[in-house]
Image (cartoon, rainbow, N blue to C red):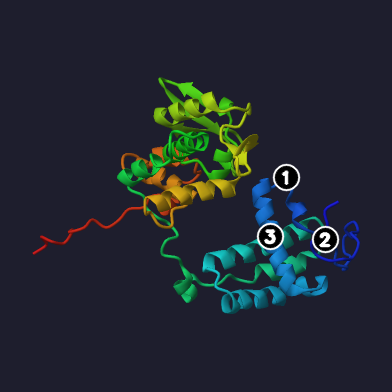
Amino acid sequence: MRDKIVTTQPFRPPAPAGASKLQPFDASILAGQLAPSSMAMYERDFRAYLAYAGPLEQALQAATLARWRAHLAQETAKSPNTINRMLSAVKRLVREAAVQGYIPAELAAEFEQISGVKAAALKDRTKSNARVRIEPAQMRQLCETPPRDTLIGLRNVALLATLASSGLRVSELTTLTRQQVQRKEGGYILRVRGKNDVAYREAPVSREAVAHMEVWLGVRPVESDYIFTAFDGRGPRMTDRPLSPVAVWKIVRTYSLEQELENIKPHDFRRFVGTQLARDDIRQAQKALGHTRIETTAKHYVLDELEVGLTDDLY
């Protein structure tokens, strides 16, 4: 059985309404509300808080969360966005713990009063390369980098082409199956379900990417529902397991560095798709990326740059 996060005390059912005794809880109380990947992030951040806070009684004091905020700001190099995400994770868990009767509602209300850090106060920690823009010519060069005379190379050609033409999240790419690639009106779409999706949505994918998938799957020596499967050992030895998100990061980093493209991440492929589609129709970009709100697309996925020479003929 998985150990509880908060304390070494044995777990007990929630106390009756009105009782003041604190009860231990962990990120599992969010089951059914968040995707497993999101729950894992909440659990990681909550563990970090508990490692700082110490005993349960100390951890469940709003003042301890405020001191942790100061600690993260003063004693670590974390960005303001990371710090605020960690604070929000703790507050969300405490809020749900109150709903489920583990702690008094008044205590959760005290936690809600703890604000996050100000981005302006920690602006020197904001990474300049957090969002890297990739130009079409660079993307073409990057996608053609893997060799075509090895199994790994054929897989990686298909993988990069899929990322570059679909805008999938890494989690959506690694779990992609043959059944999710579907013909439609002379082209292809991917039926995917992202971290916040209740139902499957359609994502674009190029004919070129599908052709690379077919070549890869045609020579792959093992059967698997997953398209992008992993290799083991130095052999390397083919498996029927899907690639991990970490493996996709390594693939993208390896080939981008070969092309002297610094700080490229898998999510930059998603921004590339959003930026290119938004040049013609931002609503198509929104739909392709699966965003509920068009403001999300405009703020985070359309990477416009100032045109060079814009003021040359002003006077």
- Neighbor class of circle 2 (other Cα within 10 Å; few <14, some 14-19, many 20+) is many
Mark 2: amino acid: Tyr
Disc 3 to disc 1: CB gap under 8 Å: no
Inter-mark Cα distance, 3 to 1:
18 Å
Q: Earlier in the sequence, mark 3 or mark 1?
A: 1
- Neighbor class of circle 1 (other Cα within 10 Å; few <14, some 14-19, many 20+) is few
Does 16 appear above or below 273?
Answer: below
Inter-mark Cα distance, 2 to 3:
20 Å
SS class of the residue under badge 1?
A: loop
52 horizontally vs 131: left or right? right
Residue 12 location (% of width, % of height): 91, 59
Question: Which residue, given by chain and number where applicable, does mark 1 sit on?
Answer: 32
**Tag nearer the camera, 1 or 2:** 1
Q: Is residue 92 visible?
A: no
**Marker count (numbered):** 3
Inter-mark Cα distance, 1 to 2:
18 Å
- Neighbor class of circle 3 (other Cα within 10 Å; few <14, some 14-19, many 20+) is some
User: Who's the residue at 78% across and 75% down the image?
Assistant: 58
User: Who's the residue at 66% across and 46% down the image?
Assistant: 35
267 horizontally vs 238: left or right? left
